[in-house]
Image (cartoon, helix red, strand yellow):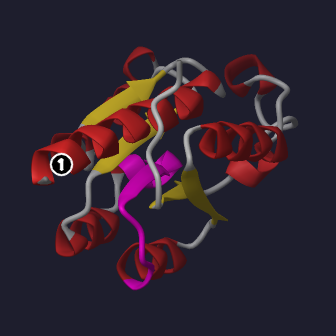
Amino acid sequence: MKPKTKNNKILVIHGPNLHLLGSREPQIYGKFTLKDINAELQKEAKQNGLSLEVLQSNSEGDIVEKITGSKYDLLIINPAAYTHTSVAIRDAILAVSKPVIEVHLSNIYKREDFRKKSLINDIAIGVITGFGPLSYILALTAAAQFLKSAAKTSK
């Protein structure tokens, strides 16, 4: 049975080039689209009693603005290429003090050396990498469990 977490809002951010899923390097990322992932996330969120807001942006500034200017309880982020380079996104996450789950479609630790360094993983409650679109569903399931547990602890 799925955990029920009422009135919690999850912000999902997809970083640069993820709008190209389905056509971009299908040997690495598969043939599914971002629309497919978002539809599955919405379905899963509804089953878990969660509210979901989704953003895909190629702009580091837009991502920072969304992290710092939105109301949400937990962030699921696939920073994509910004994983390895963006101190600004890291600082935004630290500034809002919200729990974050880092997600990657491919296993970044089995790729080029420069992709093995994440500027976010040490401030995330968890990292899910290498399961394709399932990475996002696993992150959403973990988010629901985390928020449910946090709600029990705060009572």
**10 or 33, which is in the foreground?**
10
- Is residue 125 visible in the rendered image? The answer is yes
Residue at 77% over, 45% down: 34
In depth, the one of 5 and 104 nearer the eye is 5
Say what secondary structure mark 1 lies in.
helix
Q: Tell me if mark 1 has few (under 14), some (14-19) or many (20+) residues whose alpha carbon lies within 10 angstroms of its own.
A: some
Q: Tell me if 117 is positioned left or right of 31 in this view.
A: left
Image quarter for residue 64? bottom left
Residue 93 image position (x, y, % from top left): 27, 65
At x 79%, y 44%, the residue is 39
Left/right placement of residue 46 relative to residue 87 reads right
Q: Nearer the viewer, residue 71 or 104?
A: 71
- The extreme front residue here reads 155
Among the 4 quarters of the image, the one containing residue 134: top right
Q: Going 33% across and 32% down the picture, which residue do you hit?
A: 127
Magenta region, residue range? 69-83
The residue to which callout 1 is attached is 123
Q: Is residue 9 shown left or right of residue 134?
A: left
Residue 78, magenta (yes or no): yes
Residue 101, x across and y down, in percent: 36, 43
Res 15 visible:
no
Q: Position of residue 21 (x, y in %)?
A: 78, 40
Q: Quadrant of residue 118?
A: top left
Magenta includes 10? no
Q: Is residue 83 above or below residue 27?
A: below
Indicate the position of residue 72 as horizontal and vertical percent values: 41, 68
Q: Amino acid at mark 1?
A: Ile
Label tally = 1
